[in-house]
Amino acid sequence: MPSAASSDVLPRHLAIPLIMSIATLFAANHVAARLAFDNGTGLLLAVLMRSGVACLILLALLVMQKKRFWLPPGTWPWQLAAGVLIAIQSVCLYSAVARLPVVIALLLVNTFPIQLALLSWALGGPRPSLRSCLIMGTILVGLLVVLDIPAWLANAAAMGPEWPTGIGFGLAAAFALASTLWITEHRLARVGSTLRSWLTMQTVFIAMILGGLLGAMPGGMNLPDNTTGWTGLMLLAVLYGSAFSILFISVPRLDMARNAPVMNFEPVASLLLGYLFLGQMLTPGQLVGGAVVIGGIIVLGLSRAR
């Protein structure tokens, strides 16, 4: 990857709007997914479509870049594990999106830096610093506010039976993502990013087919009930594929070491899009909690970068 001093790297006033646009496409993908689920689309089918488009894009990149379809010795089991974890993460994320407001589902998944820090420590890595612990504690407080835990405890029936299940799926998606990132950093560092991503998406694609054939999730491969559902299904695949390809092609020029925290714009974009297209809106208190979560994650990301 070029260094920040390279002439190929975009200046920040261009890189940041581009990253925000990519984050908005990812957010729109989740809004489209909720639209599809609300109109009968099976969850496994949605993940199958998304991963299939990503596979085609990555395969085209591999061919154009003339990359070798080869993994270093000893990395196959870890690559398979990464693919299975991303399959689990995809299913859990969409399960959370189907049960919660999109922005809350994404805020839950965006707690993965906290889980990654704790997982790395548990597996022999450095202990989080006092500053990092304070930031993570602040993020958790903000998360409790955005989840409106006091209201849920006071009147769980009003929040609906899907609320705790959705929270569980969101946190599980974050854990699966954190585990994948640990494997990528510590066990797959020698594998090229394009090949690693293609094999991961291929594993997800195959896992969804097997899940559908085995009936692992009742209704998981259901077709949409109406035109709105088909529109949501098509859009989630196109939006995810577009965001994925733009990010993958542009990342060498985006100086992600400095600009990666901008990707946390995704929950903000999902808040606006969820309101415009799904009528989902948070209370003022939840908005404050969401701002605390996003701000804390950005600060934590900047701290790790330094």
Image: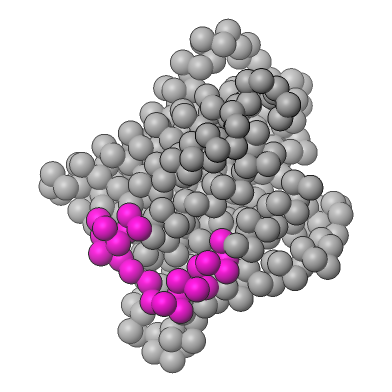
Q: Residue 108, percent across and down? A: 52, 62
Is 247 covered by the magenta stretch?
Answer: no
Please name the residue shown 65% across and 33% down the image: 255
Question: In this orientation, does residue 122 appear?
Answer: yes
Identify which residue, 182 or 223, lies in the foreground. 182
Q: Residue 109, percent across and down? A: 53, 57
Please name the residue shown 74% across and 20% down the image: 72
Q: Residue 282, percent across and down? A: 38, 72
Identify which residue, 56 or 75, lies in the foreground. 56
Q: Which image quarter: residue 250?
A: top right
What span is in magenta? 272-294
Please name the residue shown 38% across and 60% down the image: 271
Residue lying at the far bottom of the rendered structure = 154
Main SS of the magenta part reads helix
Question: In this orientation, does residue 48 appear?
Answer: no
Give the left or right position of residue 88, taking residue 186 as reference: left
Quadrant the N terminus occupies: top right
Identify which residue, 61 or 199, lies in the foreground. 61
Q: Residue 6, percent across and down? A: 70, 22
Is 293 covered by the magenta stretch?
Answer: yes
Give the left or right position of residue 280, taking residue 249 as reference: left
Q: Is residue 76 above or below residue 262?
A: above
